[in-house]
């Protein structure tokens, strides 16, 4: 009897965890879907952001450019760091690295944004720019990506490495022929999750990379961009007109779709990885 | 050879970034502490135009928001983890995981939008407030945002409890709730503890969603338990005023001091969360 | 297979009048017990009965279903067919549910699992509710004494139990099972992978327990079965092949399967690897 009561109580407590996400999703679809029309994805994006029929293509391109570029920037560093961890680091420096990465992972993205604002935007004089936003996002994602890559390489059985070493293979041959075939899938999973994660960051690029309107497609790395995240932020904060608010919801739906797309790809890769085993 | 130089480059570049970052935090906030000492941390007034920089309202605001968020998300997340690992049969696990994935996948700015559209009007109507912007709104929103972290990590902690412990307790004739409270929860406790610490750290650093619903008014709640009043958190203050402050001004270094306090507290939480893993 | 009664054969165990007062009468009847796992038959219409007291050893090759039999009796496994009747009550209709049944039928696993708390806390682990709040010093002492562990740990009952050696941990598990006052004790290879000294201690403890309750031991070690005396069952492929007084069965097995098994065991071949 007491067991039943405890179980029922626990299920009641857990209900919000089921109801809230479904409610959020349904509400998001309800508000966002009506705004999906041809003008939302129109390639003619000369109109300013507050126009209630503006296209969000520049925002989508800006968001994707920021997150894909930052992940591609962070990936080589992450691989380099995890190879250092596997090949050269002793137990003490491994532990130190682990702690340092976990600590930097926990630092709020906002603080990285401040760092970017001071160093890149003001000190180096890049102004609000794609480059500054990319580097800030890359710094945010670097610890996560590195920890993931270390994990992926560690999952390659030690026997394989020993056998390859016994055959007289060099470090780079082992990496390419032994580790790469086994680890690339989880590496790719990590990369896609990192893209999804950077797509959802708003605070760090608010001061470093994005403007509300006037930017359509960046001419160079040093020109400002617009992004879905900050676009939603400005609209949420300032829009009063019903139609403009509707644009915010449509943008939110587009953003959630993009994030979901990348994490679903990551999950699929991961699942097949486990199956193949 | 290229391999060696590549690895060396990544290590040196990362270390340089780490040092640059630490140097940035310290040097940018140093002028503030040199000029005003440590007393602003407990001062109540924040008026940048009169050079009054009291951190207390934002600190109290952050504390309240995280307390509300944890007190809601911890029971719910833990219960969800227990329900999904210990009560429901395997075939329902997918459903719960999808729900948690949805929560984790919604970007914080979208949470902010949802908060403005749903939470604020709801609070205004039900609690008869002039404006829904309040500590309570921020806490509620944040509790939803840290729920996935708590649930996932607690699920992992429960799954990691060794089968032999479960069987030993079962063969002694302990019933379900006795097993839960005497075996599962104590065994999973280190994991649950670090889950809550990590969630606290994430919640403290959350900016956009909190900024959109907290009201951003530098006031200590009056009386101290008045959660329905608009207030300020550390992150929302930085987010609000960063655009206005000119680099190098005293307001800028005051904001950097806020960032330093935030970073230090989050680092402390992260170190506490890492400790049991070391043994 | 025929149903057999172990009671009369086990009665040779010495019992003083004082001990007789402690003896709890119990009778376990197993009729047509079958168990399947992933399409494989583990137990095949097994019949067996146990009563009163004395040691019953179960021997047989790996995969014969010995451990599964114990787990069915204790109720850790529930999806079996057939019936297990304990003192005239079918175990699936046990008055206060499966958890109460498991308190009635103590089971000790092959690998000792001590909980991360003190030695005393481990002994009292199965005791919950009102009784736990009372002074349980005497209970702890008597249980540890019966498990032949008291002398080694009496001065450090509040120490962490996980610092004990594996042999001590196994005896602690026996004490823990005794603390909930079971009517019968089932042990699944309790001395596998233990050193001879711990083996001796556990065997001594089991002989002591057998004077007051039925003790069922799954064992791979034929010498140990001989030392423990009592009654022996030989199981193969989920069936009871042969049973009888340990001495007789070990020296003059009647069935060809039993003889084969003994031959393999005598020449010290790894019987485990066969199936």
Image: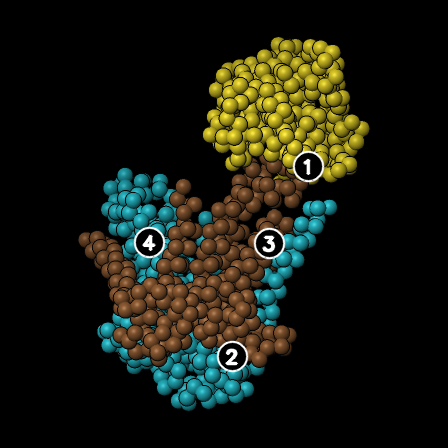
- Residue matched to label 1: C130
Residue C183 placement, left or right of C197: right
Which numbered circle lies on residue A153?
A: none
**In this view, which residue lies farthest toward the right?**
C88
- Which quadrant of the view contains residue A165? top left
Q: Secondary structure at mark 4?
A: helix
Tag 3: Cα neighbours inside 10 Å, few (<14), some, or many (≥20)? Answer: many
Give the residue at mark 3. Answer: B79
**Mark 1, chain letter?**
C
Residue A100's disc is 4
- The shade of chain C is yellow
Instruction: Judge by depth and name the residue closer to the eye, A259 or B153.
Output: B153
User: Which residue is found at the position 36% from the left and 77% from the top?
Assistant: B48
Mark 1 lies on a secondary structure that is: helix
Crowd rating for badge 1 (residues with CA inside 10 Å; few <14, some 14–19, many 20+): few
Residue wearing tag 2: A250
The first of marks 2 and 4 along the sequence is 4
> Can I make out residue C110 in this image?
no
């Amino acid at each position: 009897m007491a067991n039943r009561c405890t179980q029922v109580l626990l299920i009641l407590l857990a209900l919000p965890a089921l109801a809230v996400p479904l409610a959020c999703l349904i509400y998001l679809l309800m508000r966002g879907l009506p705004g999906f029309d041809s003008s939302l994805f129109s390639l003619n994006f000369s109109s300013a952001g507050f126009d209630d029929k503006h296209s969000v293509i520049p925002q989508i391109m800006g968001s994707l450019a920021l997150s894909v570029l930052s992940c591609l920037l962070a990936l080589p560093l992450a691989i380099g760091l995890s190879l250092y961890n596997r090949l050269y680091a002793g137990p003490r420096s491994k532990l130190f690295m682990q702690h340092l990465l976990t600590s930097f992972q926990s630092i709020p993205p906002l603080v990285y944004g401040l760092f970017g604002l001071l160093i890149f935007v003001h000190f180096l004089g890049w102004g609000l720019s794609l480059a500054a936003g990319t580097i800030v996002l890359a710094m945010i994602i670097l610890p996560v990506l590195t920890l993931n890559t270390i994990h992926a390489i560690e999952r390659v059985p030690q026997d394989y490495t020993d056998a390859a070493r016994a055959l007289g293979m060099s470090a780079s041959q082992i990496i390419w022929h032994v580790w790469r075939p086994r680890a690339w899938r989880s590496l790719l999973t990590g990369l896609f999750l990192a893209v999804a994660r950077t797509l959802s960051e708003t605070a760090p690029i608010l001061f470093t990379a994005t403007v509300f309107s006037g930017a359509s497609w960046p001419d160079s790395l040093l020109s400002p961009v617009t992004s879905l995240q900050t676009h939603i932020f400005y609209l949420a904060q300032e829009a009063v007109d019903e139609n403009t608010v509707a644009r915010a919801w449509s943008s939110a739906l587009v953003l959630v779709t993009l994030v979901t797309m990348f994490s679903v790809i990551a999950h699929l890769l991961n699942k097949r990885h486990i199956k193949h085993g | 050879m290229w391999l060696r130089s590549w690895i060396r480059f990544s290590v040196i570049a990362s270390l340089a970034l780490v040092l640059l970052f630490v140097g940035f935090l310290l040097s940018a906030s140093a002028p503030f502490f040199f000029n005003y000492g440590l007393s602003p941390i407990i001062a109540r007034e924040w008026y940048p135009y009169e050079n009054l920089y009291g951190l207390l309202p934002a600190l109290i605001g952050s504390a309240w928001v995280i307390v509300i968020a944890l007190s809601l998300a911890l029971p719910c997340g833990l219960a969800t983890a227990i329900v999904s690992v210990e009560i429901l049969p395997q075939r329902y696990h997918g459903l719960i995981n999808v729900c948690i994935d949805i929560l984790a996948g919604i970007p914080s700015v979208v949470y902010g939008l949802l908060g403005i559209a749903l939470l604020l009007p709801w609070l205004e109507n039900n609690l008869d407030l002039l404006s829904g912007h309040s500590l309570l709104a921020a806490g509620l929103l944040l509790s939803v945002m840290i729920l996935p972290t708590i649930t996932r990590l607690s699920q992992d902690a429960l799954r990691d409890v060794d089968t032999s412990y479960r069987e030993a307790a079962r063969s002694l004739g302990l019933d379900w709730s006795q097993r839960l409270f005497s075996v599962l929860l104590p065994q999973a406790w280190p994991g649950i503890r670090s889950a809550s610490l990590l969630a606290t750290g994430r919640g403290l650093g959350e900016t956009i969603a909190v900024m959109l619903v907290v009201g951003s008014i530098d006031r200590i709640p009056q009386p101290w338990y008045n959660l329905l009043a608009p207030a300020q958190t550390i992150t929302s203050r930085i987010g609000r005023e960063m655009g206005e402050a000119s680099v190098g001004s005293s307001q800028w270094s005051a904001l950097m001091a806020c960032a330093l306090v935030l970073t230090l507290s989050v680092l402390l939480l992260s170190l506490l969360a890492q400790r049991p893993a070391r043994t | 297979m025929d149903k057999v009664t172990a009671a009369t054969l086990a009665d040779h165990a010495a019992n003083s009048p004082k001990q007789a007062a402690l003896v709890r009468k119990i009778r376990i009847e197993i009729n047509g017990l079958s168990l399947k796992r992933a399409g494989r038959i583990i137990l095949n219409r097994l019949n067996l009965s146990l009563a009163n007291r004395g040691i019953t050893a179960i021997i047989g090759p790996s995969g014969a279903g010995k451990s599964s039999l114990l787990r069915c009796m204790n109720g850790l496994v529930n999806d079996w067919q057939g019936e297990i009747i304990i003192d005239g009550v079918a175990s699936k209709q046990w008055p206060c549910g499966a958890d109460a049944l498991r308190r009635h039928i103590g089971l000790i696993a092959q690998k000792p699992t001590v909980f991360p708390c003190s030695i005393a806390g481990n002994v009292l682990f199965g005791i919950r509710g009102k009784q736990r709040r009372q002074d349980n010093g005497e209970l702890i002492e008597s249980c540890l004494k019966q498990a032949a562990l008291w002398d080694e740990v009496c001065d450090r009952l509040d120490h962490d139990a996980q610092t004990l050696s594996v042999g001590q941990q196994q005896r602690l598990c026996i004490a823990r099972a005794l603390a909930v006052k079971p009517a019968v004790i089932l042990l699944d290879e309790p001395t596998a992978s233990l050193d001879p000294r711990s083996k001796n201690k556990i065997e001594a403890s089991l002989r002591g327990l057998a004077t007051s309750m039925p003790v069922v031991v799954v064992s791979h070690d034929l010498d140990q079965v001989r030392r423990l005396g009592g009654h022996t069952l030989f199981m193969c492929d989920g069936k009871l092949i042969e049973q009888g007084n340990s001495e007789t069965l070990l020296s003059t097995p009647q069935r060809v399967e039993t003889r084969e098994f003994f031959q393999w065991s005598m020449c010290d071949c790894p019987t485990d690897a066969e199936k």
